[in-house]
Image (cartoon, rainbow, N blue to C red):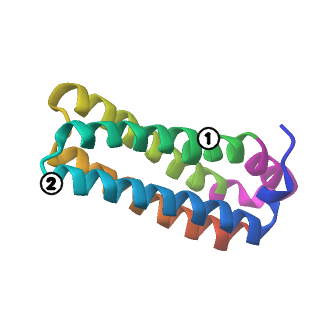
């Protein structure tokens, strides 16, 4: 897969990460406010929107990185393979947490455990972006 210039340039890549994270934080805060306010139906709708955001914005970016950018780096710098493997694991953690949230919501709805896991997504994504930006650029 061809790698676009925004994945190769630190400032552009950082902007993608920052924008994605800002949206995720904002949408997570909305879910929390609705939940705390007892507006459970609206909180569930907001949680649906948030999970779609994670899948369509953050995880799709991770997919693009793995299919093109990471392969390109590993091909040009084989010594970076261990770093690429670690960064890919971060992506896997995001995918696993999102899948676990979907399962939990099916069994227990929007719960404190789901809210905790929504926060975990943010933390993993923050660490991943910081590491990726410092290690690959």
> On the rendered image, what quadrant is the N terminus found in?
top right
Label 1: how many Cα within 10 Å (few below 14, some 14–19, many 20+): few
State left or right for residue 59 relative to residue 63.
Answer: left
**Tag 1, which secondary structure?**
helix
Mark earlier in primary sequence (1, 2): 2
Residue lying farthest to the top in this orientation:
106
Point out residue 135 in the picture as x, y percentages from the top left corner.
67, 70
The mark found on residue 116 in the picture is none
Q: Which residue is mark 2?
A: 37
Front position in the image: 62 or 23: 23
| Depth order, front residue of 80/88 | 88
**Which of the two marks, 1 or 2, is nearer to us in this view?**
2
Find residue 60 and name its label: 1
Q: Nearer the viewer, residue 3 or 42?
A: 42
Q: Is residue 62 left or right of residue 114?
A: right
Q: Which residues are magenta?
A: 68-83
Measuring 65% from the left and 74% from the top, which residue is drawn there? 134
- Seen from this angle, which residue lies furthest left? 38
Residue at the spot 18% in from the left edge and 46% down from the top edge: 113
Above or below for 100 versus 126? above
Instruction: Report the residue at 49% width, 57% height from top.
Output: 23
Q: What is the magenta segment's predominant secondary structure?
A: helix
Find residue 10 and report its image quarter.
Answer: bottom right
User: In the rendered image, is residue 33 in sight?
Assistant: yes
Mark 1 to mark 2 CA distance (whole Å):
32 Å
Residue 33 image point, x, y percent: 24, 57
Q: Quadrant of the C terminus?
A: bottom right
């Amino acid at each position: 897969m061809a790698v676009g210039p925004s994945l190769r340039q630190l400032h552009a890549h950082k902007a993608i990460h920052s924008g994605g994270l800002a949206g995720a934080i904002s949408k997570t805060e909305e879910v929390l406010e609705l939940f705390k306010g007892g507006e459970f139906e609206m909180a569930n709708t907001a949680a649906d929107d948030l999970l779609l955001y994670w899948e369509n914005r953050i995880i799709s970016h991770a997919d693009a990185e793995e299919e093109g950018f990471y392969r390109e780096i590993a091909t040009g710098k084989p010594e970076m393979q261990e770093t690429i493997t670690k960064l890919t694991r971060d992506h896997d953690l995001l995918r696993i947490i999102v899948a676990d949230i979907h399962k939990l919501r099916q069994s227990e709805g929007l719960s404190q455990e789901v809210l905790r896991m929504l926060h975990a997504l943010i933390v993993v994504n923050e660490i991943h972006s910081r590491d990726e930006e410092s290690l690959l650029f």
